[in-house]
Every structure is written in C-alpha cells, then in structure tokens.
Image (cartoon, helix red, strand yellow):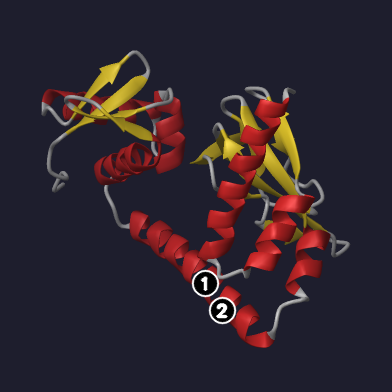
Amino acid sequence: MTSKARRLLSATVSDRLSRLAQAVSLPPAVVDALIEHHLAVTYLPGATLYRYGSPADILCCILSGLVDIISPSGASSRLIQVCGPGDIIGHVDLQDHTGRRIQSFEARARTECKVALITRGELKSLLLTLDTLTLIAVVENLNRTWAGLVSSWMSMLGQTYRVRLYNLLMEFAKRFGVEDSRGTLITFELKQSDLAQMIGSSRATVSQLLDEMRKEGMLERRSMRYILMRRPKPGR
C-alpha cells in the first residue's frame, strides 16, 4: 500500500470511528485509542467476516463497501440486513451451553469492503477508564439506539408486505442512494430474493409488488438497481 493510500485509509478510519463514538458519547481520548488500536482488513465479495456460532470476541466497524447480515434458519439461511460504512457489526451475541459468547448471525461481504476490527477486550479496557457519569451517558445512548431498532422491527409486524417493501427501499435509498433526475438511485444490486427474505415474504409476492409499483410510477428498474421516483408514500 502506498503512503497516500495509508493516509486515506487512516482518515477514513478516523472519520468512521469518531462519528460512531460521538453518537454514544465516548470522550475524545477513547476515540483516539480506538483509532490507534484497530486492525483494518479487506474482504472480497462473498467472503465471510464471521460465522454463526464463532467466538464473539471482535467488533467490526465497516469503513467502506457493503456487508450482508444473515440469520441461520434450519438448513437454510435468511438475509436480514445490509450494512454499510459507519455501521458496527458483530456486537449481537448469544451464550452457548458452556457460557461462551458466540455470534448470533453470519456476516458476508456483499461487495469488496474494508473493516476495522476492534477486540472486545480492548473496548472493555477503555470503558473501564471512564467515570460513572460518562458510562451512564454511553449506556443511555446505546439503549436509545436498541430501543429504536426494536420499535422499528415491532412496527413492521403490523405492516402489509407492500408497505414493508416500500419502507425497505426507502431506507436503502436514504442510506445508499444517489440523486437522479427522476428520483433516488439505490447504488447496489438487489435481487428479488434478497428483498423477499428481508420483508419475510415469497419472491413471487415481491415480484408482484414491484410490478405494481412500476405501473404506478413509484419506481423504475435499471438492470438490477432501483430508482425510487418522487412519489408520496403508498397508503395501503
């Protein structure tokens, strides 16, 4: 890696981790320590970052690219989330029969991605240096984040597949979209099977709903990418 590439990567790491740490009220000294002690790793498309049941001893901050979060389901598996730059993954864990902490999901690179690896041991050591009031603020902000996610998941249970699909596309457009003359282009490829897994429906249902939305002028398809047109949210 050239010195210029190292500087760019260092700046990216600093930016991503700083924004993440500020969101949970970590002080500058802890942010600096996280930036100093991370390990940056590149994964090619399709590579596994960690598997279900593997030791949950490392957190991953995505610096660039996209990562699929997959939930095992019997003999198959299900895509539940697509994460991108700035997201932390690897923090959702379970305990096995021996009391060991293991990963609840599998993470797989959707595109080539760069990830900053931070050990839980290092993070725990840094948290132990914080005063009580700062730790309380961190816990409160983490709880607010988790509560927001749980609320979002619970509200989805009462939604129709059409609304679930539209909201999912809107989320992708907001997080990974670029403005187009007609609307917002989602910048990565999405298969109908991906969308079906994420809203808990069949591929045939997703195909039908996408066709309805295209006919109503709500979206267009460009190869395997979607453009959300400037239209109001569907009411059914």
Closer to the camera in the image, 91 or 208:
91
Q: Amino acid at mark 2?
A: Ala
Which label number is shown at residue 141?
1
Which residue is outermost to the front?
3
* Above or below: residue 41 compared with residue 13: above
11 displayed left or right of 177: right
* Above or below: residue 191 compared with residue 161: above
Q: Quadrant of residue 186?
A: top left
The residue shown at (71%, 78%) is: 130
Which residue is outermost to the right?
98
Which label number is shown at residue 137?
2
Q: How many marks?
A: 2
Q: Quadrant of residue 34?
A: bottom right
* Above or below: residue 90 compared with residue 215: below
* Mark 1 to mark 2 CA distance (whole Å): 6 Å
From the top left corner, tell me how far across and down residue 74 is, in percent: 65, 40
The residue shown at (39%, 41%) is: 175
The residue shown at (65%, 56%) is: 92
Q: Are marks 1 and 2 in contact (CB under 8 Å)?
A: yes
The residue shown at (34%, 13%) is: 223
Q: Residues within 10 Å of mark 2 (few under 14, many from 20)?
A: some
Q: In what quadrant of the picture does the N terminus appear?
A: top right
